[in-house]
Amino acid sequence: MKIWKSVFYFLAIIPWTFIVSLMTFYFKAGQVLGHAPSPNNPDPKELDICKIYSPFVDWTADIWLYSFFLWLLLTIAFIIVNRKKMYWTPLVVSGVGQFFGILLLLSGIFEWYID
């Protein structure tokens, strides 16, 4: 059980790296512009700070998407293996980060970023 918990807690950290990096870029862009960025207003690549933030946001997004699919497979395996005596805490803690990552992925902020 200790290995399962460690893996799920590690997978809980990964989506937050993506969330924090993208939100930091978004708020910094808003600070530079003086208003909240919106899709195509302006294109993120037109901002000078894009060269600083973009590689980190891209890298964390890639890592998070791979870890999301790994999390799904491990969650299914965890439920099958531990169906008699379920420990929900590791699943809930890691699921919260995944949930907020998906919400951000479907938001206007990510739409602005990939614009």
Image: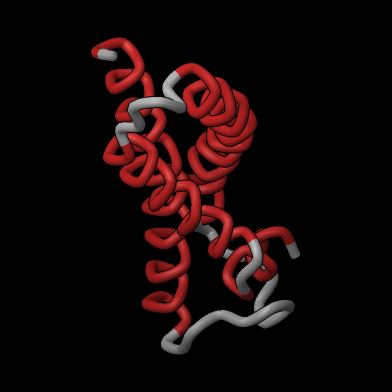
The residue at the point 38 percent across, 59 percent down is 24
Q: Is residue 114 left or right of residue 92?
A: right
Residue 94, by quadrant, is top left
| Residue 7, position as x, y percentages in the image | 36, 19
| Residue 46, position as x, y percentages in the image | 65, 65
The correct choice, above or below, for 5 with respect to 15 in the image is above
**Quarter of the figure that contains the N terminus:** top left
Q: Nearer the viewer, residue 87 or 22?
A: 87
The single residue placed furthest to the top in the displayed view is: 3
The single residue placed furthest to the front in the displayed view is: 84
Q: Is residue 66 left or right of residue 53?
A: right
| Residue 48, position as x, y percentages in the image | 53, 59
The residue at the point 40 percent across, 26 percent down is 84
Q: Is residue 102 left or right of residue 83?
A: right
The correct choice, above or below, for 97 with respect to 75 in the image is below
The correct choice, above or below, for 33 with respect to 107 in the image is below
The correct choice, above or below, for 94 with respect to 10 in the image is below
Q: Nearer the viewer, residue 13 or 49?
A: 13
Residue 66, by quadrant, is top right
| Residue 21, position as x, y percentages in the image | 42, 50
Q: Nearer the viewer, residue 82 or 21?
A: 82
**Quarter of the figure that contains the C terminus:** bottom right
The residue at the point 62 percent across, 59 percent down is 105
Q: Total label count?
A: 0
Colour convention: secondary structure
The residue at the point 37 percent across, 77 percent down is 31
